[in-house]
Amino acid sequence: MKNVKCLKCIKCGREYEALPDATTCECGGILDVVYDYDYIRENFTPDDISSSDNYTMWRYRPFLPVEEDTVQPPLRVGWSPLYEE
Ligand SMILES: [Zn+2]
C-alpha cells in the first residue's frame, strides 16, 4: 500500500506495518491508518476523482487502505445501486 505509511494505535501510539488484516494493537487499542499524503498528492489530483466514470466506492481507491492489486468485488458498492431480484 504505497498510499499508507503505517497503522497507528489510537490508544498507545505504537506503529505497525500496514497489513490488510491488522485491526487492533497488543494493548487493545484500535489501529488507525496513517496515510502518506505526500505520495497521494504526487500521484493523484482532485480531477482524477471528479472525472472518473467509476461510480462505486472504488472511485476513491487512492484513499483506501488496500493493496494496489486488490481485485474489485463484482457487487457494486456506492452510489446506492438497485438490483432486480
Ligand atoms: Zn496500543
Image (cartoon, rainbow, N blue to C red):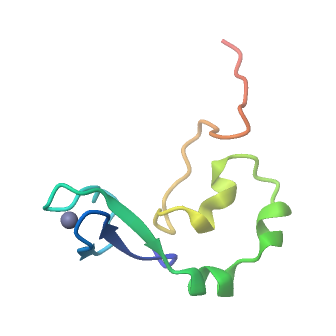
Above or below, 52 against 83 in this view is below
Identity of the residue furthest to the front in this view: 11
Above or below, 17 against 54 in this view is below
Question: Residue at coordinates 29% horizontally, 75% vertically from top-left?
Answer: 17
Above or below, 7 against 31 in this view is below
- Please state the total of marks drawn on the protein image: 0
Q: Quadrant of residue 76?
A: top right
Question: Residue at coordinates 64% horizontally, 54% vertically from top-left?
Answer: 58
Above or below, 22 against 4 in this view is above
Split into quadrants, the picture shows ligand 1 in the one at bottom left
Q: Position of residue 60 (x, y in %)?
A: 65, 59
Q: Quadrant of residue 40?
A: bottom right
**Camera-side residue of 80 and 67:** 80
The C terminus lies in quadrant: top right
Question: Residue at coordinates 66% horizontally, 83% vertically from top-left?
Answer: 41
Q: Position of residue 25 (x, y in %)?
A: 20, 61
Tell whether 1 sits left or right of 46. left
Question: Residue at coordinates 46% horizontally, 66% vertically from top-left?
Answer: 67
The N terminus lies in quadrant: bottom left
Q: Position of residue 24 (x, y in %)?
A: 24, 56
Tell whether 11 sits left or right of 63. left
Q: Quadrant of residue 16?
A: bottom left
